[in-house]
Image (spheres, grey):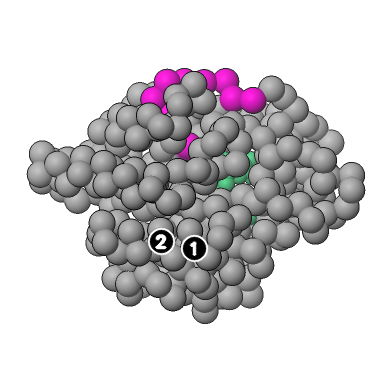
């Protein structure tokens, strides 16, 4: 989609409720990209030799989780130039998420606040969509727990999803950092993270034997964590031989925003998240072994912001909000094509 066309689309779409605009636009674009027109609009940007956790990537720029939660729009998202895409968060059972309205555009700040709460059609649905799809780039699967599952039993939900996704996904993300599921982020702390990663990694090792295939496992961390959590989590990732870390999810810190938005519930993404996610990225990359992959995400919307993430230690990148405000051209801008 060229820049002018996107500006025109944005004028109309930004008048509609964000969640509705997202669903309508993506259904339409998926229809177009599934048709014979898909071949005409198809974009592929190849930067040689990007291999991370034994997976080969055309380029290092990926689509972050949450944009296509159910793998409903794969024809569109895998054909606009991304090097990889991540679907989800998927949970064992389908769930409706939090009450609407739950997505808010902060246009002046080029940001979004979302309080979706893992609305999704369930892991079986998402996995069957990926299985049916003839993929041309790696597809990661982001997994989480149902809202009705107590946090002390969360590992069971992740184990369930890990089993379902293992043979299909190109990598799997443990999302323990969404601010929109009660107590989920407690999983990042102290004893909980240690026993959680221990049980998940034990299953992961078993699945590797069963399928004779290694599906990389990464952990997605919140930006609102103490240095102690960052240090402990990074050390556990090294100790349990987890393949990498995604830095970061959305933030609950709204101190930077005007009063009008401070009261909104949910996680903040986009430009105001950039510095906060960079701080976590820097600290993580100081502790993680060089053989681990760091995926930098949070506020990327240009060549400069992408480069800064690489400079701080990221091996791969992801974006969501930048795509909403700048359109698919942002991928070309970042890669300087
Ligand atoms: C509307 C919305 C929904 C999201 N849903 C998820 C999700 O389901 N799982 C997840 O791990 N992250 C989710 N995220 C977080 C993004 O994957 C990403 O970590 C965050 O938005 C920061 O990147 P950005 O500044 O480029 O948007 C969501 C973000 C937005 C804006």
Majority secondary structure in the magenta region: loop
103 relative to 83, above or below:
above
306 relative to 266, above or below:
below
148 relative to 33, above or below:
above
CB under 8 Å between discs 2 and 1:
yes
| Residue plotted at (41% across, 38% down) | 143
Label 2 CB sits under 8 Å from any ligand 1 atom:
no
Helix, strand or loop at label 2? It is helix
Q: In which quadrant of the rendered image does the C terminus lie?
A: bottom right
- Residue 133, quarter of the rendered image: top left
160 relative to 170, above or below:
above
| Residue plotted at (64% across, 25% down) | 98
Residue 122 spot, x, y in % from top left: 43, 24
**Label 2 crowd bin: few (<14), some (14–19), many (20+), radius 10 Å:** some
Highlighted range, magenta? 87-98
The residue wearing badge 1 is 228
**Label 1 crowd bin: few (<14), some (14–19), many (20+), radius 10 Å:** few
Q: For this rendering, which residue is in front, 24 or 175?
A: 175
The numbered disc on residue 107 is none
The residue wearing badge 2 is 232
Residue 318, magenta (yes or no): no
Whether residue 48 can be seen here: yes
Total of numbered circles in the picture? Answer: 2
The CA span between labels 2 and 1 is: 6 Å
Q: For this rendering, which residue is in front, 41 or 305?
A: 305
């Amino acid at each position: 989609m060229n820049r002018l066309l996107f500006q025109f689309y944005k004028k109309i779409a930004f008048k509609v409720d964000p969640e509705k605009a997202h669903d309508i636009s993506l259904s339409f674009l998926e229809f177009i990209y599934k048709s014979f027109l898909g071949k005409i609009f198809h974009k592929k940007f190849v930067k040689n030799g990007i291999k991370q956790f034994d997976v080969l990537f055309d380029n290092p720029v990926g689509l972050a989780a949450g944009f296509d939660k159910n793998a409903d729009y794969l024809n569109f998202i895998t054909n606009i130039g991304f090097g990889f895409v991540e679907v989800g968060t998927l949970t064992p059972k389908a769930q409706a998420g939090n009450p609407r309205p739950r997505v808010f555009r902060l246009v002046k700040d080029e940001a979004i606040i979302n309080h979706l709460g893992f609305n999704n059609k369930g892991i079986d649905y998402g996995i069957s969509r990926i299985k049916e799809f003839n993929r041309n780039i790696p597809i990661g699967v982001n997994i989480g727990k149902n809202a009705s599952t107590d946090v002390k039993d969360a590992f069971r939900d992740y184990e369930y999803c890990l089993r379902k996704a293992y043979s299909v996904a190109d990598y799997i993300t443990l999302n323990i950092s969404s601010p929109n599921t009660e107590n989920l982020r407690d999983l990042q702390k102290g004893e909980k993270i240690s026993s959680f990663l221990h049980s998940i990694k034990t299953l992961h090792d078993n699945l590797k034997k069963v399928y004779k295939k290694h599906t990389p496992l990464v952990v997605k961390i919140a930006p609102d964590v103490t240095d102690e959590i960052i240090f402990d989590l990074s050390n556990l990732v090294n100790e349990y031989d987890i393949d990498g870390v995604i830095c970061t999810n959305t933030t609950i810190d709204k101190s930077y925003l005007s009063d009008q938005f401070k009261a909104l519930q949910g996680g903040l993404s986009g430009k105001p998240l950039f510095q906060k996610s960079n701080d976590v990225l820097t600290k993580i990359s100081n502790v993680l072994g060089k053989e681990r992959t760091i995926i930098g995400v949070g506020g990327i919307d240009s060549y400069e912001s992408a480069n800064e993430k690489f400079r701080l230690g990221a091996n791969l990148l992801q974006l969501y909000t930048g795509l909403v405000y700048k359109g698919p051209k942002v991928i070309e801008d970042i890669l300087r094509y």
